[in-house]
């Protein structure tokens, strides 16, 4: 989306389209391009008057451009809407800010779960360019929220399984082991089979127990230590022949997190990446781990009008074939897998843990490039005092 913002702001200001002596054909009219863009784009002047809206914005707001030209944002939304604060921050910081999961509600508007990106227009002091995405467009976020419910149902089920399956299972396993030592070779094979399969079920139940709703203990964590730990684990095991590239921002502050859970998260993402790049047809398999600081990434705190800052990101990228089209809408749901021996629990666990940390996960996938990006909160003074 930030590419869209950058493009739209260039279009509006007419900057960066052609250089002197440039013989490339003249680009279409900027207003025509803006008009055709399927995302709502609007420009507010320093008094929050609508200076420009595209067609998608007219539809989004349900008011014609001519009507909007007479209005200010205050006429559409109550002043305590967090969008006003965000717009002020864009003006103050002169930086792009994305606000996720905003509710734009008033007698005239009923929009929930909207992602808004605000950018300054350097040539027009005080003007702010807003690009909006509703929930269906902000699919990455949508999935993340949808998944939370799914993980809850797994956590309930995990508790039942742990009780009702594990005990009888250990009885079955023990009995099979006894049989192994007392029967003939042909039957011994069968007894071994029982034992192996019992172990497989136990492993599955163990993995599901990770979904339990236990409160998590958090400390200040150096994310790079977590990434290094996982890389070493991977390279001494399942990813022995895969090239790793690291692009870390060494100045990052610590995250407020549970270390073991973060290891689990990154391990699952790296394992998926390794499995993707070792498929047929992938030349020069590679996994890129990167971290960085990104201002203006915020989400709603459930049940409060406060916004949580998520300035730190961790990305795991691979050059595999991409996520199969048919499972994308359900990517973070449990038991969704395209692998014959997959459990489909990895990403749902990842999303649950990140959700428990108040973070956000985004996916961008196409053939040759798949990236999972985690946005995490850093340690605040309040955390440090605890
Ligand atoms: N990096 C990736 N590249 C391509 N597909 C992926 C990637 N990560 C996850 N997937 C897809 O998402 C599915 C679910 O992943 P996951 O929840 O970890 O379960 P599992 O790995 O057991 O299949 C995978 O089966 C795969 O189809
Ligand atoms: Mg997996």
Image: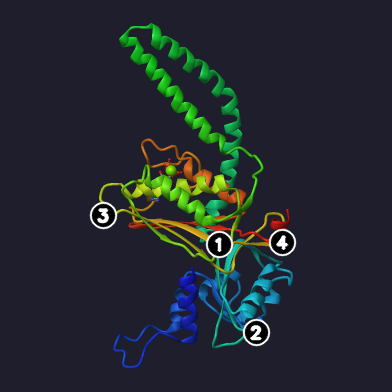
**Crowding near the residue tagged with mark 3, few <14, some 14–19, many ≥20 C-alpha atoms within 10 Å:** few
**Which is nearer the N-term, disc 2 or disc 3?**
2
Cα separation, mark 3 vs mark 4, equals: 48 Å
The quadrant in which residue 370 appears is bottom left
Q: Left of 305 or right of it: where is 271?
A: left
Q: Give the label, 3 or 4, closer to the camera.
A: 3
**Residue 291: where, in percent of width, then height?**
49, 61
Task: Write the residue at 40% across / 85% down.
Answer: 17
Q: Secondary structure at mark 2?
A: loop
Q: Which residue is mark 3?
A: 283
**Which is nearer the N-term, disc 2 or disc 4?**
2
Q: Left of 88 or right of it: where is 225?
A: left
**Which is nearer the N-term, disc 3 or disc 1?**
3
Q: Which residue is mark 2?
A: 46
Query: In the rendered structure, are the residues bearing label 2 and label 1 in contact, judged by CB atoms less than 8 Å apart?
Result: no
Q: Which residue is mark 4?
A: 305
**Residue 147: where, in percent of width, then height?**
55, 47
């Amino acid at each position: 989306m930030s590419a869209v913002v950058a493009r739209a702001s260039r279009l509006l200001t007419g900057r960066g389209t052609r250089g002197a002596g440039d013989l490339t054909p003249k680009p279409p009219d900027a207003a025509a391009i803006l008009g055709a863009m399927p995302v709502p784009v609007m420009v507010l002047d320093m008094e929050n008057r609508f200076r420009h809206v595209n067609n998608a914005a007219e539809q989004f707001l349900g008011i014609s451009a001519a009507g909007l030209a007479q209005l200010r944002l205050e006429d559409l939304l109550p002043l305590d809407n967090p969008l006003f604060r965000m717009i002020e921050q864009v003006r103050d910081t002169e930086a792009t800010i994305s606000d996720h999961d905003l509710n734009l509600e008033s007698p005239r508007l009923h929009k929930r779960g909207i992602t808004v990106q605000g950018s300054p227009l350097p040539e027009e002091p005080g003007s702010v360019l807003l690009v909006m995405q509703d929930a269906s467009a902000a699919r990455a976020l949508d999935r993340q929220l949808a998944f939370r419910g799914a993980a809850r149902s797994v956590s309930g089920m995990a508790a039942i399984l742990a009780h009702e399956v594990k005990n009888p299972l250990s009885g079955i396993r023990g009995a099979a082991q006894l049989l192994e030592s007392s029967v003939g070779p042909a039957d011994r094979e069968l007894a071994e089979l029982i034992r192996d399969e019992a172990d497989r079920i136990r492993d599955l139940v163990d993995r599901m127990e990770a979904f339990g709703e236990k409160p998590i203990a958090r400390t200040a964590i150096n994310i790079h230590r977590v990434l290094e730990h996982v890389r070493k684990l991977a390279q001494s095991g399942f990813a022995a022949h895969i090239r790793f590239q690291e692009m870390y921002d060494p100045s990052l502050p610590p995250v407020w997190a549970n270390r073991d859970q973060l290891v689990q998260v990154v391990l699952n993402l790296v394992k998926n990446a390794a499995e993707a790049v070792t498929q047929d047809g992938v030349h020069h398999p590679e996994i890129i781990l990167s971290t960085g600081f990104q201002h203006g990434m915020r989400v709603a705190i459930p049940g409060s009008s406060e916004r949580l800052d998520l300035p730190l990101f961790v990305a795991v990228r691979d050059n595999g074939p991409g996520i199969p089209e048919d499972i994308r809408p359900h990517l973070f749901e449990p038991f969704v897998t395209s692998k014959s021996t997959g459990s489909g629990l990895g990403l749902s666990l990842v999303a649950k843990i990140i959700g428990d940390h108040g973070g956000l996960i985004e996916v961008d996938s196409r053939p040759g490039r798949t990236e999972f990006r985690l946005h995490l909160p850093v340690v605040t003074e309040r955390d440090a005092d605890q």
